[in-house]
């Protein structure tokens, strides 16, 4: 960078390209040196229970992936989707039945309020 660029704060296109590459490397997961003044923060410490839980999940997931064929995985996911759809349908039906019951009760209550001489149901 020339003295004039340094004083004006303008950066060369090459420097901007290098910064862009550095950002891209961060996004892709490759190691990028820290900028001056930055410190590497260590990953958060896990307690024994959380560490053991995560490790068990990793092992279980790896074993499942290794043993389970594509067909088995598709069947398992289909069962989960079917169960979810059936649960939603049951809940919708229960909600609908509750709403209909409430309408029936309101209708019966409004009919009871109608005066005996009025046969149309309107007041």
Image (cartoon, rainbow, N blue to C red):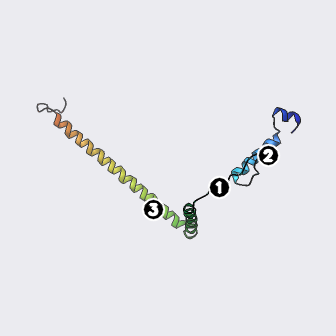
Q: Is mark 1 on a helix, strand or loop?
A: loop
10 Å crowding of disc 2: few (<14), some (14-19), many (20+)? few
Q: Is mark 2 on a helix, strand or loop?
A: helix
Is residue 72 toward the left or the right of residue 31 in the image? left
Q: Which numbered circle lies on residue 26? A: none
Q: Which numbered circle lies on residue 79? A: 3
Q: Which of 36 and 109 is in front in this view?
A: 36
Q: Give me the C-alpha separation between circle 1 and circle 2.
A: 27 Å
Q: Nearer the viewer, mark 1 or mark 2?
A: 1
Query: What is the residue that sits farthest to the bottom in this orientation?
Result: 67
Residue at x 43% of width, y 58% of height: 82
Sequence-first disc among 2 and 3: 2
**Toward which corner of the image does residue 53 lie, by quadrant?**
bottom right
Rendered position, 65 above or below 33: below
Query: What is the residue that sits farthest to the left in this orientation?
Result: 117
**Toward which corner of the image does residue 68 lie, by quadrant?**
bottom right
Q: Which numbered circle lies on residue 18? A: 2
Q: Position of residue 5 (x, y in %)?
A: 85, 35
10 Å crowding of disc 1: few (<14), some (14-19), many (20+)? few
């Amino acid at each position: 960078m020339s003295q004039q660029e340094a004083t004006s704060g303008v950066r060369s296109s090459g420097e901007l390209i290098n910064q862009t590459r550095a950002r891209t490397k961060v996004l892709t997961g490759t190691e990028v040196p820290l900028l001056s003044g930055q410190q590497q923060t260590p990953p958060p410490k896990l307690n024994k229970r959380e560490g053991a839980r995560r490790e068990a999940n990793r092992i279980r997931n790896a074993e499942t992936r290794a043993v389970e064929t594509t067909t088995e995985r598709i069947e398992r996911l289909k069962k989960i989707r079917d169960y979810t759809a059936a649960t939603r349908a049951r809940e919708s039906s229960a909600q609908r039945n509750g709403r209909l019951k409430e309408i029936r009760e309101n209708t019966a209550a409004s009919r009871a309020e109608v005066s005996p001489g009025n046969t149309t149901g309107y007041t």
